[in-house]
Amino acid sequence: MALITWTESQYGTKVGFADEEHQVLFGKLNKVYDLATGGADRLEIGRALDDLIAYVVNHFAHEEKEMQAKNYAGYVAHKVEHDALVGICADLQTKFHAGEADVTDAVGQMVKGWLDSHIPAFDMPYAGALNS
Ligand code: FEO
């Protein structure tokens, strides 16, 4: 079962590129989660994890570029949030490839919880600025 399902009412930001990228990101997160909790080959999980993290990094960079282009007042606080998650992901990625950590149900729930909080609290408020 999918870990996270994008709906307009829960995750819609009213910013086209963000909604599109969030849906791709959710798909990649679900893939990692399904592989990891379904007992897939570790190499396959690692590939999907690398793909997800690369996508997250690019998505954050895209949002940050758009916020900066509009001189969005919430940029700095938003970037702090992004950097914190990238740090957690990079640490997990390093440990996973070193055989020191696994992608567990708890890891999936943590990322889902972060998105459940971040998108409404940080992404949705930039709509006015980014659509101006
Ligand atoms: Fe869509 Fe700020 O992450």
Image (cartoon, rainbow, N blue to C red):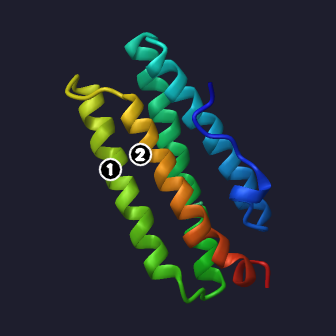
In the rendering, at what x and y percent does residue 15 appear? 76, 67
Quarter of the figure that contains the C terminus: bottom right
Quadrant containing ligand 1: bottom right
Q: Is residue 64 left or right of residue 76?
A: right
Q: Which residue is mark 1?
A: 88
Depicted 24 relative to depicted 114: above or below: above
Q: In the image, what residue occupies the spot 61% across and 66% down?
A: 120
Q: Amino acid at mark 1?
A: Ile
- Quarter placement of the N terminus: top right
Residue 116 x, y percent position in the rendering:
55, 55
Q: Is residue 125 above or below residue 103?
A: below
For the residue pair 80 and 57, the one nearer the viewer reads as 80
Q: How many marks?
A: 2
Secondary structure found at label 2: helix
The three-letter amino acid code for the residue at tag 2 is Met
Observer able to see residue 61? no
Q: Do callouts 1 and 2 mark residues in contact (Cβ within 8 Å)? A: yes
List x then y, in percent, for residue 8: 78, 55
Judging depth in this view, the residue of 108 and 73 nearest the camera is: 108
Q: Would you say 102 lies left or right of 51 here?
A: left
From the image, tell me which residue sits under label 2.
110
18 to the left or right of 55: right
Vertical position of residue 44 compared to residue 3: above or below: above
